[in-house]
C-alpha cells in the first residue's frame, strides 16, 4: 500500500527529474518544492500527513491506477 509519505517522496523525485527543464518564472522552484515535500513526508511518518502537501504531491504524481 502506498502511504502519504510515499506519495510525497515520489512527487519530490519527479520534481527533481524535471528541474533542469523548467524555464522562465518557474525556474528554480522545483528544488525548494521538492525539499518541502521531502520534509512533509518525514512529518507524515512522525505526526501525520499535511493535507496541503499531499494535495500538491497528488497533483504532481497524477492519477493513480
Image (tube, rainbow, N blue to C red):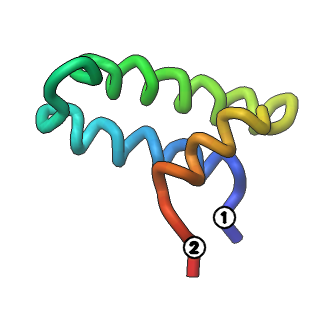
Cα gap from disc 2 to disc 1, whole angstroms: 10 Å
Q: Residue at x 54, y 22 (%)?
A: 36
Residue 44: x %, y % from top left: 75, 36
In the picture, the quarter occupied by the N terminus is bottom right
At horizontal 81% and vertical 31% (from top left) the residue drawn is 46
Position of 2 with respect to 9 (left or right) is: right
Decide if residue 56 is on the left or right side of residue 52. left
For the residue pair 26 and 9, the one nearer the viewer reads as 26
* Residue 60: numbered disc: none
Counting from the top left corner in percent of width and height, residue 65 is at 57, 82
Determine which residue is flagged by label 2. 64
Q: In this figure, which residue is indicated by the disc labeled 1?
A: 2
- Compared to residue 24, the image places residue 37 above or below, namely below
**Regarding mark 1 in the picture, which secondary structure is present there?**
loop
Q: Is residue 28 above or below residue 23?
A: above
Q: Residue furthest bottom?
A: 65
Label 2 close to label 1 by CB (< 8 Å): yes
- For image coordinates 48% across by 57% down, the residue present is 61
Q: Which one is nearer the viewer's eye here, 27 or 1?
A: 27
Q: Residue at x 37, y 44 (%)?
A: 13
Left or right of 28? Residue 63 is: right
Disc 2 secondary structure class: loop
Q: Quadrant of residue 55?
A: top right
Task: Determine crowd level at label 1: few under 14, some 14-19, many 20+ residues with C-alpha closer than 10 A.
Answer: few
Q: Earlier in the sequence, mark 2 or mark 1?
A: 1
In the rendered view, does 19 fall on the left or right side of 6? left
Residue 49 placement (x, y as % from top left): 79, 38
Amino acid at each position: 500500500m502506498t502511504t502519504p509519505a510515499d506519495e510525497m517522496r515520489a512527487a519530490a523525485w519527479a520534481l527533481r527529474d524535471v528541474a533542469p527543464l523548467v524555464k522562465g518564472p518557474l525556474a528554480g522552484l522545483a528544488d525548494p518544492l521538492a525539499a518541502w515535500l521531502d520534509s512533509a513526508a518525514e512529518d507524515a511518518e512522525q505526526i501525520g500527513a499535511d493535507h496541503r502537501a499531499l494535495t500538491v504531491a497528488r497533483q504532481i504524481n497524477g492519477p493513480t491506477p
